[in-house]
Image: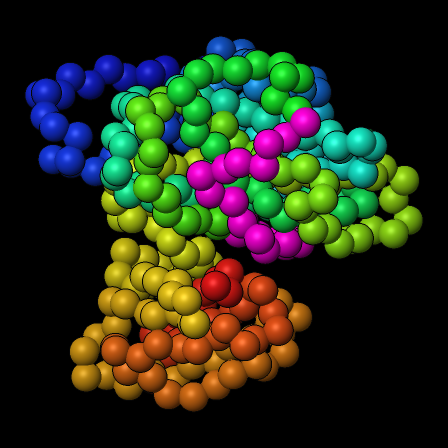
Amino acid sequence: MRKIAALVLVSLPIWCFAQNLVPNPSFEEYFNCPNDYGESFELRDWFMAIANPDYFNVCDGTTDTCGVPNNFSGFQNPASGDGYIGMITYSNDPPDGFRELLGVKLTTPLVPGTTYYASFKISCTNGYPNLDNWTRYAANKLGVRIRQDSLVGASWYPSDNIAQFSSDSIVTDSVGWTLLSGTFVAQEIAQWLYLGNFFDNTNVSNIVIDPSCPDEYSYYYFDDVCLSLSMEDCPLATATRLPAMSGRIRIIREQNGIKVSGLVAGRQYSYEIRDTLGRLLLEGLMNSDSTLYTANLAASIIVLRLWDGGEVHRMKILVP
């Protein structure tokens, strides 16, 4: 079991330094190793708000029920560290569907009127190769909600369709991790963050990823949850990156496209934009001040490839 180190800091105003306000953000710290369904109660700091989210960690082995990368819900390596969680995020059950939600108390309350950056990573799974958790759908509206109180139980539903951040994109990628991110302005002093889907079925879009599956729900892995005053802690882009670009190039999503920052001034870059099936959507030349207009692309997830005759950078991005 991982041990928690204590760190004493000088008392400073919250705006003096940036930090992730979510404790245990990548689900590394636990009380006991999980070995069965619904054991997210073994996580430090986090608690089950609705139903029984699942916890997966390498401590349970590589092919066991709650192991990593192979477990009862599918196959996936962590986005970082050794652990991640899994939740049902949508179901077709009447009247309002079924959801699982996980909650955590932030290290610092939100300050009203302040802008916050939120992000987390997800990976879709339909249970393959272990069909214990065989799922039919991929769905959207995954996000975070901030409340003043700690709520547990069915009183959350029917949902009131409120979230500080939620994504309209339907993520079907089960090979890698997709980062969902956004910003919001705090409206009240609140310290409880919840992760999942906070919308009823009439406000959720879905697609069938396995028509042969009998189970009418969607299931996602979650990792690397972040809430911060700074986008340096919670980046607003997702990237599958080569080591050479780490810490230098950043994607900023704008209303009509994406802007790439961190490119070398005065240097010209060639780019290709492809969908997740490898089909070429857009190509051309850009410099350090260019914006790539992606609003009219049919794909909701694209792969951007940049090169300058030397380094090659490849990033997977959610289109604005």
Give me the residue at 33% from left, 84% from top: 286
Query: Magenta includes 175?
Result: yes
Q: Residue at x 66, y 70 (%)?
A: 277
Residue 68 quadrant: top right
- Locate residue 3, reporting x and y percent: 36, 15
**In this rendering, does residue 56 appear at all?**
no
Q: Position of residue 59 (x, y in %)?
A: 55, 23
Residue 162 shows up from this direction: yes
Coordinates of residue 124 in the picture (x, y in percent): 65, 46
- Where residue 134 sits, quadrant-wise, is top right
Q: Which quarter of the figure has residue 119? A: top left
Check residue 136 for magenta coloring.
no
Q: Residue furthest bottom?
A: 284
Q: Name the side, left or right, on which 215 lies relative to 8.
A: right
- Compared with 107, 219 (above or below) is below
Q: Predominant secondary structure in magenta?
A: loop
279 and 91: which one is in front?
91
Along the viewing direction, whichever of 35 and 318 lies nearer the viewer: 318
Q: How is the image coloured?
A: rainbow
Against 207, residue 109 (above or below) is above
Please provide the residue range marked out in magenta.
Answer: 158-178
Residue at point 27% right, 17% down? 5
Residue 202, horizontal then vertical, whole percent: 72, 44
Q: Going 38% across and 37% down the picture, which residue do you hit?
A: 226
